[in-house]
Image (cartoon, rainbow, N blue to C red):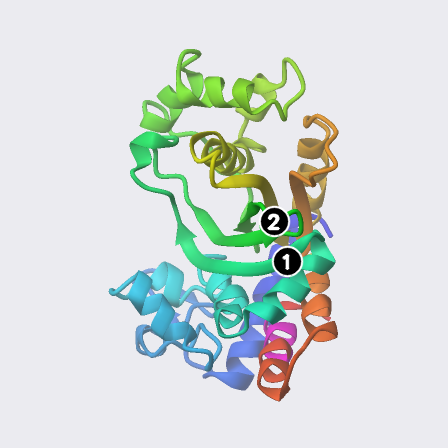
């Protein structure tokens, strides 16, 4: 589905979900009303999150203060990593089974974090890049690995702000973006100008941070995988993911992959350990999948 049509369909879906399951009330701004926004009251109560597995507690632990864009806007992706991945903290074995179906060779899941960036940042990309979700695991070869996840819903790429630190960093041929791109060995020659464009820049930055961890912490981690989760009907990310993959050197390590919401939910259902997780999977299906 073309991206604009998908966003319109997603908006209709979220409004219908909110009206049925939360409230028919919606956010009223000074100049307009937005029906896919929860009221501030409902947002502060955690209504944008699944009621279980201490998901909202995890949100407030990571972000103590209410933020309407994250906590009330049902079309943005900021809340989704909490709904998708916090429940796995209650059952690492379940998480292992799901990601084995996606990647394979996972012996155990050892750590799960939401909105994670390694520190100190100066040792890595020295910017504000972070992963929507971050999983450390033990590989079947007895080494350690990382899964870094970026989640998209209705968003597209964003333009580079003129004069920003990011613009300067990305165009600095002696800077970390260039040096890590080269040192990682995962990219084909002469693709950096394409990686810098709006369409690929965020995926590239996230992937570079992951590869930077491998370079800096090479005694700890031997494997790393960058995954982008997105709804199947948002063809924008399917096309962008395919083009990005074509800029990578062929690798059996599954360095990069795209995972649809539908595929993720299906794998969760296949490996579902109990009724509590079954209720969560039903929620994900109803909340995010447009029929």
Q: Mark 1 highlights which residue?
A: 107
Instruction: State whether residue 111 is above or below residue 214.
Output: below
Q: Nearer the viewer, residue 161 or 230?
A: 230
Residue at disc 1, secondary structure: strand
Residue 32 is at least partly visible in this image: no
- Dot placed on the residue nearer the N-terminal end, 2 or 1: 1
Marker count (numbered)? 2
Residue 56 location, quadrant: bottom left
Instruction: Evaluate if marks 2 and 1 touch, with contact meaning CB atoms under 8 Å apart.
Output: yes
Q: Nearer the viewer, residue 96 or 247?
A: 96
| Residue drawn at (38%, 76%) of the image | 46
Residue 95 x %, y %: 60, 66
In 3D space, how far apart are the residues under numbered discs 2 and 1 (Cα atoms)? 8 Å
| Bounds of the magenta segment | 282-287
Q: Assess disc 1: are there few (<14), some (14-19) or many (≥20) residues with their C-alpha within 10 Å of its C-alpha.
A: some
Residue 184 location, quadrant: top right
| Residue drawn at (48%, 29%) of the image | 215
Instruction: State whether residue 206 is above or below residue 174.
Output: below
Residue at disc 2, secondary structure: loop
Instruction: State whether residue 258 is above or below residue 246.
Output: below
Instruction: State whether residue 56 is above or below residue 139.
Output: below
| Residue drawn at (54%, 32%) of the image | 204
On screen, residue 197 versus residue 278, left or right, reads left
Q: Mark 2 highlights which residue?
A: 142
Residue 43 x %, y %: 36, 73
- Give the main secondary structure of the magenta stretch: helix
Residue 251 is at least partly visible in this image: yes
Q: Residue furthest left?
A: 65
Q: Nearer the viewer, residue 39 or 122?
A: 122
Q: Assess disc 2: are there few (<14), some (14-19) or many (≥20) residues with their C-alpha within 10 Å of its C-alpha.
A: few
Residue 50 x %, y %: 49, 77
């Amino acid at each position: 589905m073309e991206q604009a049509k998908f966003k319109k369909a997603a908006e209709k879906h979220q409004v219908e979900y909110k009206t049925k399951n939360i409230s028919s009330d919606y956010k009223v701004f000074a100049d307009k009303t937005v029906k896919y926004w929860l009221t501030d009251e409902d947002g502060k109560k955690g209504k944008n999150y699944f009621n279980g597995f201490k998901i909202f507690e995890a949100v407030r632990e990571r972000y103590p203060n209410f933020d309407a864009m994250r906590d009330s806007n049902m079309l943005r992706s900021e809340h989704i990593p909490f709904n998708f991945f916090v429940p796995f903290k209650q059952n690492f074995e379940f998480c292992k089974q799901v990601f084995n179906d996606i990647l394979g060779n996972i012996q155990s899941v050892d750590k799960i974090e939401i909105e994670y960036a390694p520190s100190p940042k100066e040792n890595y990309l020295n910017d504000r890049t972070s992963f929507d979700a971050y999983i450390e695991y033990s590989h079947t070869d007895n080494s350690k690995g990382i899964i870094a996840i970026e989640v998209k819903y209705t968003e597209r790429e964003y333009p580079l702000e003129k004069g920003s630190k990011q613009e300067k960093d990305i165009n600095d041929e002696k800077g970390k973006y260039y040096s890590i791109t080269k040192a990682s060995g995962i990219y084909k020659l002469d693709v950096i100008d394409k990686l810098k464009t709006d369409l690929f820049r965020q995926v590239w930055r996230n992937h570079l941070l992951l590869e930077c961890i491998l370079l800096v912490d090479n005694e700890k981690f031997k494997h790393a995988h960058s995954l982008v989760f997105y709804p199947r009907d948002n063809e924008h990310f399917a096309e962008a993911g395919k083009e990005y993959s074509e800029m990578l050197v062929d690798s059996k390590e599954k360095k990069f992959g795209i995972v649809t919401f539908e595929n993720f939910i299906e794998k969760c259902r296949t490996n579902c350990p109990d009724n509590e997780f079954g209720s969560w999977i039903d929620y994900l299906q109803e909340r995010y999948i447009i029929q």
